[in-house]
Amino acid sequence: MSSIYNFCAGPGMLPPEVIEHLREDMLHWGNTGCGLLEVSHRTSAYADLKAHTEANLLKLFGLDDQYTILLLQGGASAQFAMLPYNCLREGASADYLVRGYWAEKAAQQAARVARIRRLHDLRDGWRNDAVYAHVTTNETISGTALPENFTKPDVPLCADMSSDILARPRQYRDYVFFYAGAQKNLGVAGLAIVVAEKEFLSKARRNLPAAFCYLEHAKANGLYHTPNTFAVAALRHVTDWLLATGIETVWAQNQRKAEKLYAELDASSFWRPIAPHNERSITNVTFRLPSAELETRFLVEASHQGLLALKGHRSAGGIRVSLYNAMPESGVDKLIAFMREFNQIHG
Amino acid sequence: MSSIYNFCAGPGMLPPEVIEHLREDMLHWGNTGCGLLEVSHRTSAYADLKAHTEANLLKLFGLDDQYTILLLQGGASAQFAMLPYNCLREGASADYLVRGYWAEKAAQQAARVARIRRLHDLRDGWRNDAVYAHVTTNETISGTALPENFTKPDVPLCADMSSDILARPRQYRDYVFFYAGAQKNLGVAGLAIVVAEKEFLSKARRNLPAAFCYLEHAKANGLYHTPNTFAVAALRHVTDWLLATGIETVWAQNQRKAEKLYAELDASSFWRPIAPHNERSITNVTFRLPSAELETRFLVEASHQGLLALKGHRSAGGIRVSLYNAMPESGVDKLIAFMREFNQIHG
């Protein structure tokens, strides 16, 4: 396995020790006498796991108990609908900054349940009477990121952070509500991490169907329905690993990985980077080759060398290199060596 | 592990070979070059897994392609809301047979989005103008089951089968829509199996928020959001195991397990079975002891012998023995031996 690198945009690569912990948990989980998959979510073992994991997350976000964490199902996509359904009452409206595929998805779903306004450019200005403003911090398909210092609104700020959550230090307290699917930087598919300021959440709607209702999930302490216990255990191991490594160390490594790769792309006109310079993502690097034939050849030859899942999203084509936290720097080095060779032969 | 038996009501025991397959999948999954947890849901490997698993299920249910399977998140509890939200249009109404805790939960959630009528006794009669009728085939908390030959309605029949799905042969084609959380008889937490007759589903509402909309999930072929790929792999292994064993063999074993245990309960007045004779569940056997003190002692001593998770639901108290498909007959034999000893000392 050591020479195989998986550049998938999600589900993504996991730290090998996380997989080993999970395999061990499946045989013997703590002092439960059972394997992880067979333990009830009503046990103290699960309560401890959940408390430990949520404490890890708050520590990593630099947040205190003014925030609450909900570990839900349905991925970030379910939050596209749940956020406006829960937080926009009759007649109320929200601003959505739409500068990519996923931001548009969020806006589309919100528009099915409430009134929203789309902003395509921050220069258009946020409204002051919106209930909240919504941004997407990183767009996996175009490989573009919202600059950290973008103009914040005066109203509560919400964000889909699915593809760069905990990939970098961030002023998480600038946001009253943010969410992410776990399967990129935080574990495995089937879990959404929702982080909400308690005061913002307290104004949400009640008496919705419980499965769609944040306040019901909060009231039930995450046990309204049987949680995805396996994904929570994965999240625990990933956050343990992040805390042990240190978010600054991870961030420094993520910067090095992205900078190396962008430097390579900029060094030859053979490569055609897709994202504008000032919006380049550190987690998803996208580029094209001179022809579709060369792109196909690139993908096939890369996979023969153990460089996997480099194909761009079906809506964008080209090459996409996803560099989540678990991708080691050696993976990028190997990719760059392959790219140089490929360029020499076909350039 | 061989002498430990986990009688949890869910997540429940898994066949040991299923756990071994999953542990292996996590290292090397098919010819993907990656572990199961790191493979994209957009690969042919996942498409094959999904197709194989759904074909397994249809075969086990004895259904053909007039039915479709949706592998969703949010457990059966999310279906409590989604079924009426999707299938009851403005002004339409459904009948809910309510004879236990989970049936009442389903009815409560339906009442938040639509008009329903509760039936507490089948002698009250189903309505002919309901859009559908809903039943709960087995109640895990009381340990009661709906007899297989109950009076069916003349309108489309829907069911929550979470706790006895594929525990027995059944005329699944009597139902136009049925669903179950996977974590009892079909795998791990974080997955709901929804089976719908295509014609029934075709009348459902469109343009709902996609995450809550059956027709959107069907249109996206289960990929509207990143599916719980691990739970689908678990379901695949469980259904492979069920097909290899044979549902008639599993059913015969399930009957023997339940009959032995009920015979033991009926043999001494020390035990106080909770469910009425003619409604006894084969998957969840519930009883009380002469005092709460004895019940506590029973649970502690049982767990010392490796007989785990026998505590009744918090709302019911007493003892609950869950006998899902993966519980071997030897587990019941060991439990009965312990019960005899306990009765001799404390009876």
Image: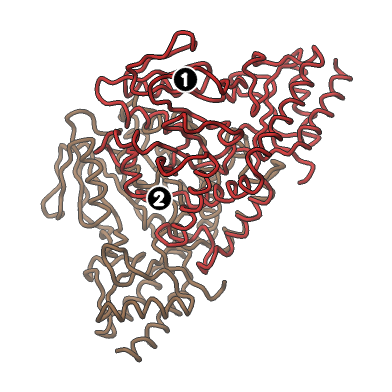
Chain colours: A red, B brown
Residue at 43% x, 11% y is A125
Would residue A64 be found to the left or right of residue A303 on screen? left
Would residue B256 be found to the left or right of residue B315 on screen? right
CA gap between label 2 and label 1 equals 42 Å
- Which residue position holds label 2? B181
Q: Nearer the viewer, residue B325 or A104?
A: A104
Would residue A48 be found to the left or right of residue A250 on screen? left
Q: Secondary structure at mark 2?
A: strand
Residue at 42% x, 25% y is A157
Residue extending furthest top? A124
Q: Is residue B292 above or below residue A56?
A: below
Chain on which label 2 sits: B
Circle on res. B339: none
- Which residue position holds label 1? A152
Q: Is residue B281 above or below residue A175?
A: below
Foreground tag (2 vs 1): 1
Residue at 48% x, 11% y is A120
Q: Nearer the viewer, residue A191 or A302?
A: A191
Q: Position of residue A215 (x, y in %)?
A: 31, 41
Q: Position of residue B148 (x, y in %)?
A: 28, 58
Answer with the quarter of the image where residue B111 lies.
Answer: top left
Few, some or many C-alpha atoms within 10 Å of disc 2 (few <14, some 14-19, many ≥20)?
A: many
| Residue B51 in view here | no
Q: Secondary structure at mark 1?
A: loop
| Residue A110 in view here | yes
Q: Position of residue A262 (x, y in %)?
A: 74, 21
Would residue B21 be found to the left or right of residue B148 on screen? right
Which amino acid lies under the numbered mark 2 shown in the image of this protein? Gly
